[in-house]
């Protein structure tokens, strides 16, 4: 096992420039501006300039060229900046990991897609609290890949094809079946009795699933038509647009169960559902499934999905 003595630590510390000076250079190098670096670091422009000059004196090289057009990195500065930026990123990651390890064992931070959180998870969360009142849950939403090394997240639920990075543990939860829906008023004005009738409508698009309408038309044995309706970033936006008669939407069936029950939406062509190739997965770092809070959450998810 490797260990360091006080002398080792002193030698390492003595060989490094000032941490404040390194930070000032890293931020100024990213912005190529002392002014913007000062704003980010909440110090004066003069303080940033002095710290960078101190660092250049310590290293014995010039890191910036100062010209009327602004700052430019010298070859030495361009070599130093990426390595220094990576070092600060690793330091920030390690700090977050240590802080996360100090959280209580009964704390669970969950992230998932926004519409999944609003439409599927939140209505069921009370059941989890009823079964596990001792577990504190934090829920956030995001539609980007989860970086467990940098984010204070324990588990995530994401949509994907199953091709997840090797450093993640992934457990399939449920498939996604997409259905065609529209408001009763819209379908009364322009009835949809057969797939060809869909072409007469405005087709609401989902900006992260641009292929959805092409898949639906192909499943109905027709050539896809160009989209003639607005596009929305999240399914909950498409759902609200459909409820308000802006057009027909393709959405996962479990997102609109309430609207179909109370009649705010209608599924005119139930024969033409599309079972997508992807599905929803529970993601976490390998080995963490043994932790009590995550183990309880996994068991609960499996139970409610099978119900």
Image (cartoon, rainbow, N blue to C red):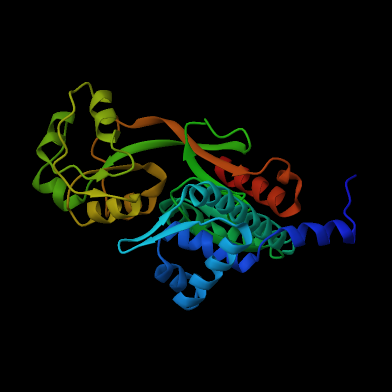
Measuring from the top left, give residue 184's x and y in whole percent. Answer: 19, 50
Q: Work out which quarter of the rendered image holds the N terminus and state it.
A: top right
Residue visible at 68% across and 55% down in the picture: 94
* Number of numbered discs on residues: 0
Residue nearer the viewer, 63 or 206: 63
Q: In this view, does 276 lie above or below 122?
A: above
Q: Nearer the viewer, residue 117 or 147?
A: 147
Between 150 and 218, the residue placed more toward the observer is 150
Q: Is 277 situated left or right of 242 in this image?
A: right
Residue that lies at the very extreme toward the top in this rendered image: 221
What percent of the width, then of the height, locates residue 268?
A: 23, 39
> Is 45 displayed left or right of 168 in the figure?
left
Image height check: is 86 above or below 26? Answer: above
Q: In which quarter of the image is residue 293?
A: bottom right
Q: x%, y% of residue 206?
A: 29, 44
Instruction: Give the image location of residue 251, x and y in percent.
Output: 33, 43
Q: Nearer the viewer, residue 275 or 155?
A: 155
The residue sitting at 22% across, 47% down in the picture is 182
Q: Which quadrant: the C terminus?
A: top right
> Residue visible at 60% across and 47% down?
301
Query: In the image, is residue 229 above or below residue 41?
Result: above
The residue depicted at 29 percent of the width and 35 percent of the height is 212
> Where is 170 relative to 224, above or below?
below
């Amino acid at each position: 096992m490797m260990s360091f003595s006080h002398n080792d630590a002193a030698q390492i510390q003595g060989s490094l420039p000032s941490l404040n000076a390194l930070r000032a250079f890293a931020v100024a190098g990213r912005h190529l501006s002392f002014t913007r670096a000062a704003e980010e670091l909440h110090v004066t422009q003069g303080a940033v300039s002095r710290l960078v000059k101190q660092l250049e004196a310590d290293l014995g090289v010039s890191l910036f060229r100062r010209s009327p057009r602004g700052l430019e990195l010298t070859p030495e500065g361009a070599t130093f900046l990426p390595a220094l930026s990576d070092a600060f990123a690793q330091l920030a990651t390690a700090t977050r990991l240590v802080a996360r390890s100090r959280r209580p064992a009964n704390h669970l931070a969950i992230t998932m897609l926004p519409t999944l959180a609003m439409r599927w998870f939140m209505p069921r969360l009370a059941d989890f609290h009823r079964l596990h009142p001792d577990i504190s849950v934090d829920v956030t939403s995001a539609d980007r890949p989860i970086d467990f090394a940098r984010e204070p997240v324990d588990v995530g639920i994401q949509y994907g094809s199953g091709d997840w990075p090797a450093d993640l543990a992934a457990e399939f939860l449920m498939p996604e079946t997409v259905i065609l829906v529209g408001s009763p008023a819209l379908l009364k004005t322009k009835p949809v009795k057969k797939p060809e009738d869909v072409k007469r409508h405005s087709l609401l698009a989902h900006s992260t699933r641009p292929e959805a309408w092409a898949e639906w038309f192909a499943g109905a044995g027709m050539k896809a038509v160009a989209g003639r309706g607005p596009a929305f970033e999240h399914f909950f936006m498409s759902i609200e647009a459909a409820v308000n008669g802006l057009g027909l939407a393709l959405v996962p069936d479990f997102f609109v169960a309430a609207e179909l029950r109370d009649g705010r939406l209608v599924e005119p062509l139930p024969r033409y559902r599309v079972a997508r190739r992807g599905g929803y997965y529970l993601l976490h770092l390998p080995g963490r499934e043994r932790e009590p809070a995550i183990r309880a959450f996994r068991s609960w998810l499996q139970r409610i999905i099978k119900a």
